[in-house]
Image: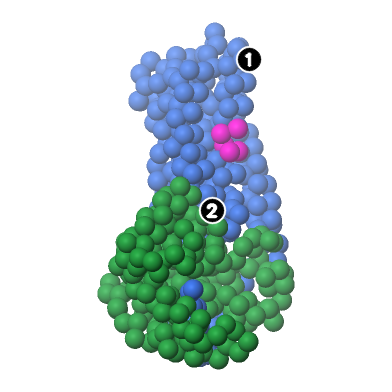
């Protein structure tokens, strides 16, 4: 019922000439990139943790809320990384339902986790005022997360996504959540307000940045003249 | 495609020969400009060429290529060519299609009937909203699954089904009994 048309033979020749001038990614590039990014992420997080140190009240924290927070943040970061860094069934990323669910649902789940289960022990310092104490933590989250976001974008370099903004937002969410986990392990200040404003909210600019960069990076700088 | 992804340069031309008619036709339907469609087809295959090391063995190529093509088209509309020409003069007529050199194919009458129906459906689809027409073409014309069409269009499977169904209803209203030859 439908008829397909062919590009001109000249177009084929132009394509083959252009392809011969361009370098293609080597076989197995995807797994090399994923492996390198995972190793670099672990190395970066461990290096930062060794510099910042573990929070002073660590041994006084109640185990259930501490475990729930650490495991919850780790699971959220792994899920966002998995969804953001997948090639998908057809090489165009995760499907839009999954992306929407993660990009919209996970921040809400993290908000509930942080608001309801903030680890608080006898030695925890209560943040007297939220915003003045929150911004240094927020800045740290951004500084830790930005290289991770860059790594994620590097892994995806060369791919074109069906939903680039949502995919980029998931990458931003993943990087922010890894950084959040690290800061939660380091920061001795308690209180849901501090955790929300200082540790959680930086995910918003990171999601926006990921969405913008991945959306813009797929665009051709100029059309190939052949 | 596996040979191509494994770095076999000889497979590049084969991949282009196999995939370019579908991608070119897909783009031609979107932009209605042969020169632009050729440029974007070339850019689509260059992107696939550059990303060959990232290819997941066994992944369907057509939805991948269509997604790249669609994104390139949208970018081209946004940034390079605000005007899309409505000049499909080069599109083969029903007679040309019916007299195509397909030996050992259906009879000339059948081909002519198919070509006329394709022409009528194509003209009717042009009157529909682009999202509906694209959903219908991907499912009925290119034989993609609902999931694959959803990936190409960047939307949910439910939305694709709804758009294709609406397109079918609109086509049936426009074409009447001739649509009975196309399954809903």
From which residue to which does the magenta span run?
A75-79
Among the 4 quarters of the image, the one containing residue B173: bottom left
Q: What's the colour scheme?
A: by chain
Rendered position, A179 above or below A123: below
Q: Colour of chain A?
A: blue
Mark 1 touches mark 2? (CB < 8 Å): no
For the residues marked 1 and 2, what is the alpha-carbon distance in whole angstroms? 44 Å
* Secondary-structure class at tag 2: helix
Q: Nearer the viewer, mark 1 or mark 2?
A: 2
Q: How crowded is mark 1: few (under 14 residues within 10 Å), some or many (20 or more)?
A: some
Q: Chain B is drawn in which colour?
A: green
Mark on residue A63?
Answer: 1
- Locate residue A41, reporting x and y percent: 62, 44
Q: Which chain carries label 1?
A: A
- Locate residue B135, reporting x and y percent: 43, 60
Q: At 40% from the left edge and 39% from the top edge, which residue is drawn?
A: A204
Rendered position, A224 above or below A154: below
Q: Main secondary structure of the magenta part?
A: helix
Of residue B64 and residue A4, the one placed in the foreground of this image is A4
Q: At 57% from the left edge and 75% from the top edge, which residue is drawn?
A: B19
Q: Could you confirm whether marks 1 and 2 are on the same chain?
A: no
- Locate residue B31, reporting x and y percent: 36, 74
Q: At 48% from the left edge and 17% from the top edge, which residue is drawn?
A: A116
- The answer to if A124 sits in the magenta stretch is no
Q: Is residue B21 left or right of residue A59?
A: left
Q: At 54% from the left edge and 78% from the top edge, which residue is drawn?
A: B20
Q: How crowded is mark 2: few (under 14 residues within 10 Å), some or many (20 or more)?
A: many
Image quadrant in which the N terminus of chain B is located:
bottom right
Mark on residue B147?
Answer: 2
* Secondary-structure class at tag 1: helix
């Amino acid at each position: 019922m439908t008829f397909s048309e062919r590009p001109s033979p000249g177009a084929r020749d132009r394509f083959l000439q252009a392809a011969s001038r361009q370098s293609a990614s080597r076989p197995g590039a995807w797994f090399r990139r994923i492996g390198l990014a995972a190793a670099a992420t672990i190395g970066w997080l461990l290096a930062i943790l060794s510099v910042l140190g573990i929070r002073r009240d660590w041994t006084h924290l109640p185990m259930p809320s501490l475990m729930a927070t650490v495991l919850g943040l780790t699971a959220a970061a792994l899920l966002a990384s998995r969804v953001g860094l997948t090639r998908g069934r057809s090489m165009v990323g995760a499907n839009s339902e999954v992306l929407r669910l993660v990009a919209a649902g996970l921040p809400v789940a993290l908000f509930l986790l942080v608001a309801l289960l903030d680890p608080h022990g006898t030695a925890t310092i209560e943040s007297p005022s939220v915003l003045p104490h929150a911004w240094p933590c927020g800045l740290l989250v951004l500084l830790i997360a930005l290289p991770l976001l860059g790594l994620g974008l590097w892994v995806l370099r060369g791919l074109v996504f069906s939903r680039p903004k949502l995919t980029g937002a998931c990458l931003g969410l993943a990087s922010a959540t890894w950084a959040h986990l690290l800061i939660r392990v380091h920061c001795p200040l308690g209180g849901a307000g501090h955790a929300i404003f200082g540790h959680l909210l930086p995910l918003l600019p990171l999601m926006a940045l990921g969405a913008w960069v991945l959306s813009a990076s797929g665009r051709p700088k100029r059309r190939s003249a052949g | 495609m596996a040979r191509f992804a494994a770095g076999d340069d000889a497979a590049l031309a084969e991949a282009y020969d196999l995939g370019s008619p579908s991608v070119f036709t897909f783009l031609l339907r979107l932009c209605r400009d042969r020169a632009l469609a050729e440029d974007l087809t070339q850019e689509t295959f260059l992107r696939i060429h550059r990303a060959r090391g990232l290819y997941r063995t066994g992944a369907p190529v057509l939805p991948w290529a269509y997604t790249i093509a669609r994104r390139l088209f949208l970018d081209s509309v946004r940034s390079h060519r605000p005007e899309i020409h409505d000049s499909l003069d080069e599109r083969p007529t029903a007679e040309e299609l019916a007299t195509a050199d397909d030996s050992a194919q259906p009879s000339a009458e059948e081909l002519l009937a198919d070509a006329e129906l394709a022409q009528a459906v194509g003209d009717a689809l042009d009157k529909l909203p682009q999202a509906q027409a694209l959903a219908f073409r991907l499912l009925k014309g290119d034989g993609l699954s609902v999931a694959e069409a959803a990936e190409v269009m960047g939307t949910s499977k439910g939305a694709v089904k709804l758009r294709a169904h609406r397109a079918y209803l609109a086509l049936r209203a426009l074409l009447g009994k001739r649509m009975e030859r196309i399954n809903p």
